[in-house]
Image: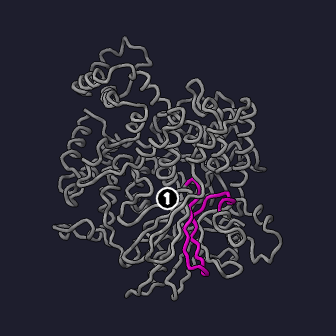
Amino acid sequence: MLIHMCGIAGFWKTKRSSEDPLETLNRMGVALSHRGPDDSGTFYDPATGIALAFRRLSILDLSSQGHQPMVSASGRYVIIFNGEVYNFQEIKAELGERAWRGHSDTEVMLAAIERWGLDSAVRRFVGMFAIALWDREERRLFLVRDRLGIKPVYYGKVAESFVFASELKAIQQCPDFQGELDRDALALYMRHDYIPAPHCIYQGLHKLPPGYILALSSGVSCPELHSYWSAREVAKEGVKSRLSISDAEAIEQLEQKLLEAVRLRMLADVSVGTFLSGGIDSSTVVALMQAQSARPVKTFTIGFHEDEFNEADHAKKVAAHLGTEHTELYLTPQDARDVVPLLPSMCDEPFADSSQIPTFLVSKLARRSVTVSLSGDGGDELFGGYNRYLLARSIWNSIERIPKTVRKTAARLMQSVSPNAIDHIFRLLRPVMPRRMWLSTPGDKAHKFADLLAVGSQEAIYHRLLSHWECPSKIVLNSSEPRTVFDSIAESAWLPDIEEVMMLTDLLNYLPDDILTKVDRASMAVSLEARVPLLDHRVVEFAWRLPLHLKIRNKTSKWILRQVLYKYIPKELMERPKMGFGVPIGSWLGGPLREWAEDLLSVEKLGRHELLNVAEIRNKWTEHLSGSRNWQYLLWDVLVFQDWFYAANRRVTTESFSGTQPSQLLRQ
């Protein structure tokens, strides 16, 4: 049966080292113990230098029959596997009668690989997975990542060894690990608040892209990568074969696919629950779970006392309507702030999506009662849910007929008036303005709009909307920002509508490298398995065959998903503005986190590693504290990096920093 969420790690070392390889391997496994506290295993072949480490979180078939590393029936293959293949029973039936040793999906996967080969077998798998497969016969190592990037895989070179792991903290256990920062990757981080694949914060290390297989013929050879499933190709095929059916037929077909995706992810021999924010995506998942469950589904929500960040009231109403066993916990600001010191260890890389904080807290809440929790992630990217999908076209329609020279002049005029002055004007005019024009921080919004006036296309507007620091290479000294996401936007420009360009770009970048990274690290930090039914690849393929008007209609996002949900929950219960899953970073920086921020943003701390433009960052900090501009997201990026950097070097004394290069400081 399905057995685990886990951590995997390993290396291929062709030269002898001073340290026993098994000691290194054991340390790598221990570093991932939070991902798999229930069991561990190792495999080492001295003749080839191949080494595999595994940590297991048992979910189904809790016996030793699912122990890994697992050897195939013929003895040819050895596998370690993080994730689940939900349709393994169907594959097992297709393979026919044989002397099965146990009931795990891992054994079925090995049999499928032996029967059909790795590529053909992986294409049959429905699930989320990161796989390391050692072929003893051909002496080749393979790494495989699931289609959407739900489970992580890092890989690369440490000294003369090839290394890989679910998280960087395992790779850091290698005795030759140097940890030299990649300034270009840091520049990418400053733009996006995450580091897009295949880049990594450390030189020589990479993220395996979603839907890829890596093959390696020796520990010192160059890896060969090829795609077995491509979201871009799925989009192309979907556009070529758009469904021409009625609204009712499309809604029915989507409902059936979602019911099946949810049903598969409810399978477990341990308790299963689900996160419930009260939004469209999570409410749909809960509704479809409850429709297929004989007992009340366990749902979990955290609430904040700040109204603009609180969704708990909505979630409670949804839970009451569906009859779930609901648990909610209202958090104080201190509860959330206490998570901040945990972030560097949780992520290994700089990662500044502040919604990681509530995601960790709701995972911690759920873990008190369940071992598995379903999540609604993916609905925005598949069905057009983000506000920016509507905003980019709206902005472009407003400005495209205005000559660019006029727009540039208008932008300069707007930016010549301080945000504080604009705020003052709005306060004076507020008594005579319609309520819909009442804005919070109108001056800051006016300056942000001015930034967009000079752009030349909808795609450029979208890239600007995705950006935190507009010119990261000016912030990260001696860096050259890779065009990773910008090129992804350009390569999607063949799509007929800008909304679909944005959705595909997010599916390829923001979803795996931000959203799914956040969910994986936050849930695994408390040994909770998170499953994402909306990202069943068959649902993704179906979604790309749907015409855009079934996703965005009359400025209503996720139209078709809403219609599925309204079969289970009254429409009036769900009609409310979309909220993000965030925390009040801006007010924290000027209040309870100010001392922490002041320390990390001091001239001395900013300049010590000689990585960042101190003057530019200090200027933003001064403006933010004065209230003249709201730079919370840009400053949060810098603060998270600073906290990560100094946490990575917490054993180094202050005196030893003098004259020391960052690469030396990051040795673990």
- Indicate whether residue 372 is drawn in magenta: no
Residue 441: horizontal and vertical position, in percent?
34, 28
Residue 79: horizontal and vertical position, in percent?
61, 74
Q: Quadrant of the C terminus?
A: bottom left
Q: Is residue 124 left or right of residue 665?
A: right
- Residue 213 visible, this orientation: yes
Residue at image x 53%, y 84%?
Answer: 44
Residue at image x 55%, y 76%?
Answer: 140
Residue 252: horizontal and vertical position, in percent?
75, 36
Secondary structure under the numbered disc 1 in the rendered image: helix
Identity of the residue furthest to the top in this view: 432
Label 1 crowding class (10 Å Cα cut-off): few <14, some 14-19, many 20+?
many
Residues in magenta?
A: 122-148
Residue 213: horizontal and vertical position, in percent?
55, 63
- Indicate whether residue 125 is drawn in magenta: yes
Q: Quadrant of residue 414?
A: top left
Residue that mark 1 sits on = 521
